[in-house]
Image (cartoon, helix red, strand yellow):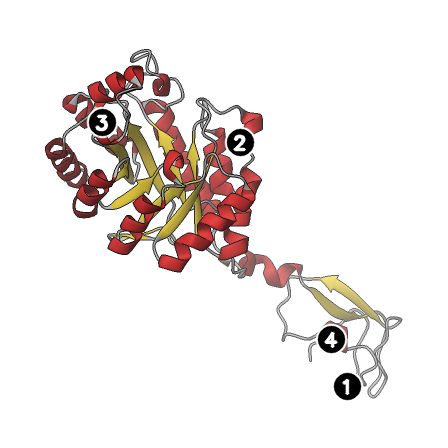
Amino acid sequence: MKIKKFDTKKKILIVGEIGNNHEGCFETAKKLINMAAKAGVDAVKFQTYKTEKFISIDDRKNFKKFKKFELSFSQFRKLKSYANQKKLLFISSALDLESASFLIKNSDAIKVASSDNDFSLLYRKILKSKKPLIISTGFLNSNDINNLIRRLIKIRRSDITVLHCVSCYPTEKKEVNLLSIRNMKNNFGVEYGYSDHTIGVEACLCAASLGARIIEKHITLDKDFSNFRDHKLSSDYNELRELVKQIRKIELILGNKFKKIQKGENRILKAVRRKPFALKKINKNEKFTEKNLNFLRSSISFKKTDINKLINKKSKKIFRINQMIDY
């Protein structure tokens, strides 16, 4: 997936998921962007919505909470500008159709949350806009995910990343089931990643090791910021900074899928490869056999000889005992 100049094929995209941890405060949102930039992530993510188009008024408790947390489109424009100034990509979950229209023009990529991965009107709108799409797979089993991916790639194949996700807050370690993310790539060749809801960073590191190209982790200024659920499962600055550091190490260790001889190997290669030596005097035209040859490591340089093809060949000259066979 390419988001502006960022190519997830070349580097894991680490996303600091702010979500609603700003709790409706614009200045807190900016502080979270600052924290994310300082910790070294590549992107920040919010949730963009109009409460009236997202939560039914009948659900009074949630309506009141989300209304309190709601930021305006104008504020999101400013937050995108602020994040971009900090060299961060700006991503947000579109939680209603009007917000999707807004984000198509005012984001670097759009996320579809697990709660909406069955809301085809929403993801179709985003796909048709050609804006990069990230979609989470909470509440779905493997067959559901396969069917979802089929629907997505019928509309568009490029710039789609499917995130493995378990929508439990927090997710217990035994519920994470990271091995299932391989099916997303193996079955359809789509890019895959991981949206985390566990406490700690171990699951994110495992996902990176398994080849996830996007790692999304909730972030907070303080795990005890308030009684809002998401703070406890979020990473504070120190934890986030360590997560970034460890993912970059994992990337370095993983390398790429093509095996090559490393420079350090080349330095010792000649010393460890076996060379043929005369076990006893070998006369001209005498055949080389296991009985008159010895195969030893030696630091002496010699022309490359395929020792596996030497057996039964005739000697072109006389070799004295312990002399290297160098042709």
Name the quadrant containing residue 221.
top left
Residue, disc 2: 176
Kindly identify the amino acid type of the residue bearing the numbered disc 2: Val
Q: Residues within 10 Å of mark 1 (few under 14, many from 20)?
A: few
For marks 4 and 3, give the one nearer the viewer: 3
Secondary structure of the residue carrying numbered label 2: loop
Residue 57: horizontal and vertical position, in percent? 26, 21
Secondary structure of the residue carrying numbered label 4: loop
Q: Earlier in the sequence, mark 4 or mark 3?
A: 3
Q: Is residue 210 left or right of residue 274?
A: left
| Contact? badges 4 and 2 (CB < 8 Å) | no
Taking 185 as reference, is 20 above or below it? above
Residue 98: horizontal and vertical position, in percent? 20, 40
Distance from label 2 to label 3 (Cα)? 30 Å
Residue 320: horizontal and vertical position, in percent? 80, 75
Residue 51's label in the rendered image is 3
| Contact? badges 2 and 1 (CB < 8 Å) | no
For marks 2 and 1, give the one nearer the viewer: 2
Kindly identify the amino acid type of the residue bearing the numbered disc 1: Lys
- Which residue: 27% across, 49% down? 125
Residue 219's label in the rendered image is none
Residue, disc 1: 317
| Contact? badges 4 and 3 (CB < 8 Å) | no
Residue, disc 4: 325
| Contact? badges 2 and 3 (CB < 8 Å) | no
